[in-house]
Amino acid sequence: MATVEDRQFRVEPFPGGTPGNQRLVEEGRLPDYDVVGTRPIRHDGTDKVTGRARYGADIKLSGLLQGYVLRSPHAHARIVSIDTSRAAEVPGVHAVCTNADMPSADHRAGDLGEGMVDWYHLNQNVLANDKVLYTGHAVAAVAADSVHIAEEAARLIEVEYEVLPPVLDVREARGADAPVLNDDVRTDRQPAGETGDTPTNVAKHFHYEKGDVDAGFAAAELVIEREFTTETVHQGYIEPHTATAFWSPDGKITVWTSTQGSFMIRMQVAELLDVAISKVKVVPMEIGGGFGGKIAVYLQPVAAVLSRLSGRPVKLNMDRSNVFDATGPTPGSYMKVKIGVDAEGKITAGEAELLFEAGAFPGSPINPGCMCVFACYDVPNGRIDGYDICVNKPRSNAYRAPGSTHVALATETIVDEICEAQGICPVEFRLKNAVKEGDERVDGVTYPPVGMWETIKAVELSDHWQSPLEGPNRGRGIASGFWFNFGGNSVVAATVNEDGTVSLIEGSTDIGGTRASVAMQLAEILGIAAEDVTPTVVDTDSIGHTDVTGGSRTCHATGLAAIKAAEDIQAQLRQRAAMLWDVESEQVEYGDGATLTGPEGKTISFQEISGKLTQTGGPVVGRGSVNADKHGGAFGTHIADVEVDPDTGKVQVLRYTVVQDVGTAIHPSYVEGQMQGGAAQGIGWALNEEYHYGDDGRLHNASFLDYRIPTCYDLPDIETIIVEVPNPGHPFGVRGVGEVPIVPPPAAMANAIFRATGVRMRSLPMSPPKMLHELLASDG
Amino acid sequence: MAKQRIVSTSINGNPVEFLAAPRQTLLEVLRDNLDLIGTKEGCSNGNCGACTVIFNGRPVDSCLVLAVEAEGGELETIEGVALTDGLHVIQDAFLGQAALQCGICTPGFIMSTKALLEENASPSEDEIRFHLAGNLCRCTGYDKIVRAVQQAAEGVTN
């Protein structure tokens, strides 16, 4: 068998894209599909370009009340008392609620699909009980005839606080003298399974070890150890959180909301309000971006409680400052990472200490951070310690490859330093050290077939890498990144219509075009056009449990469910054809061109037999239900060209290319879109985005003016090279695409900045003031 | 609540009268009073452009306009862009170029694009990026949006 190094590759335009949209092709191996890999118009597109699509805030119901949530002005305080009596007396007010109106919760763990939650803590996050732990922490809520009345009434709620000192930095928060946020938190040490016995902010300590780390470093010719910090950042979805709920007199609760996972909202509402899940129906509205931040509940249980108290449906919307103050974010971090290499540039050992902000309650993505830190490379000896640490900031949430972007900054800039010190090309170093099938990660996982090496190969062959970059203050950097991707539960039901089309229903909310990519997989199996499938996302009473749209899982797992539904349809249609022809169904084949063939040259098309279903036993419904577990990890490598203004410290991105192994691209346009959008978020994280807190713990930049995400004027064209190393765990080879592209940008930018200026940036964001400070320091 | 006033305006070519309190923004009235929910709220302080409408020929953030200021004016919202016999070339271009993911910013981008192309039928890529810098998109990285505007400009020019 030829080794990967012997195989021949080329980079060429991906059909149907612009010149900047390319793919890596292996000689003699091109995928052969009819629908997969094409670019049909997305099914929900017309509604979205005409303003008819209904998002969370667009719901209207008769008798609808509007609510307002009163939030803490303090970062850390004990609630002495809450008096809502004056608010309740305001004309037009129908209900006022506090935590006391919710059932009390226990310390039990719930799995939200992209992170665990403790119900006791989630209860307190939804409405504070005895303490507020960050500015913007919800304290009470009002429902009234209008949002303005609700807001005016909420301001009459009298809350007496005993203000406590806040702690905002992870290193301070783990110190013995730090104020402790939650007196119920004890350090949970994994995998040892030990629990500490004193109250602490250090909620978790993960420890992984592989091989002989000390011997590995002793064998190294070069060892580089560096410290890194990143600031708290927000997912920055454009649609604020919103929820509308009606608690019917029969005990049923209906929630209309914008969410990544309607079944996770159902579970959380049921748990927090102590009702059976069957009593809760969640109607997923269109979702205006999530990126991991729209999985946990904030407003949904509060709207339900206000509805119970008022007897009317209640809508709660956050404004933008609420979104920054109280939702999101992804943690700020402190990281110390050490890597050793031998004289040939092979990694001999790695060591990492990672401190992530949990925010107000435990639950940062520290464990994935630990598992990702050395994930791109064959590290024979490794030791990783990760800590989840509570600070007075909003409870952290998943954000696109949670934890991986942080650690890639550390590993990938050290790798670049090693290349610089040893005089090795960064592409060559990565080709030499890239993980391959059978390599074992430090946390003990052995890789299935993966495409890390191929992404580097694509970089090497790319026009971008092969084009010289000239001019002063300019530099080029590359960096790689990893994400596990995910499988999980998905359900699809597909009904054959008598005109030869298929109506597909699914539980996966569609954030970036998954109606299309799921429908296309069903169409490919049946041999019909993507346009002949009508996909609809339905509520939790109408389809089986489907996990979140997150973890890059939807195209993979809901796609698998669609494939199973299509195969179910094929089996049923073979029976129907057998009935028409009076033969056994084993004698009927469902072949290419959506045609069923039987003995003696009998044929009938999918369209024809669709019109004969009522004569042969009634409508045909295909079912697909999966708990997918063969998702296959994914890697990306990015190339960044930057120019650094020596007078202002501003970094301009000149050219940017995203290379990623996606397994198989179902709808290349939306795959490219994920790659481009993830890179843009990563560039924003790299260059500008950060939460600015005062010493009192108040957030100073809770607006899109002051928390500035990239605009189209800040970014260049973002070129893409799709790499397709098929995932053996999916019939078409899908791995998933959404998360990896946010991982490499900060490190790629830092490496490019070094080549441009000679300055190593080890702290995000690499904003003009920090950049200028480092430039001036290096001159001195 | 302060006394409501009658505001007479034109929306998408049709005369419209509505009641508005002095504090209400045009965005709030469009969405809540007039059921024109295609105009989206992203920030309510003029930073994201999701609520862009065309007011007397100019793109504005409707969250920064008081509803009473619409008196005597001409408004165009996303609901008025499609033609009776099909989509506008800008809408076709956004679909064809896959220039949307979640879609919440899309109406605002389409309105800003329409205003741009009415003023400058053949904008350069730099002019497109400069003109659209008031509209935030967090999903796409803007690349495909820029391609869509370029495609639409060709369609408008032809």
Image: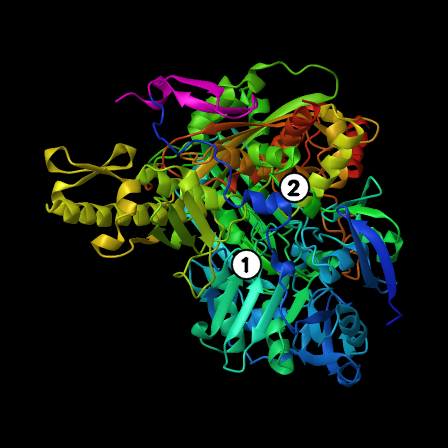
Looking at the rendered structure, the kind of residue marked 1 is Ile
Quarter of the image for the N terminus of chain A: give it. Answer: top left
Label 2: few (<14), some (14–19) or many (≥20) C-alpha neighbours in 10 Å: some
What subunit carries mark 2? Answer: B
Would residue B74 appear left or right of A204 to someone viewing this image?
right
Picture layout, residue A248 above or below residue A483: below
User: Badge 1 sits on which subunit?
Assistant: A
Display coloring: rainbow
The answer to which of A573 and A497 lies nearer the viewer is: A497
A158 is higher (above) or lower (below) than A196: below
The residue positioned 54% from the left and 38% from the top of the image is A674
Q: Does the magenta portion include A12?
A: yes
Q: Which corner quadrant of the image does residue A440 belong to?
A: top left
Residue under label 2, please give it.
Answer: B82
Task: Give the number of the disc on residue A295.
Answer: 1
Residue at x 34% of width, y 22% of height: A29
Residue A244 appears at what percent x and percent y? 61, 67
Q: Magenta residues, as a range?
A: A1-28
Quadrant position of residue A73:
bottom right
Is A8 positioned to the left or the right of A641 in the image?
Answer: left
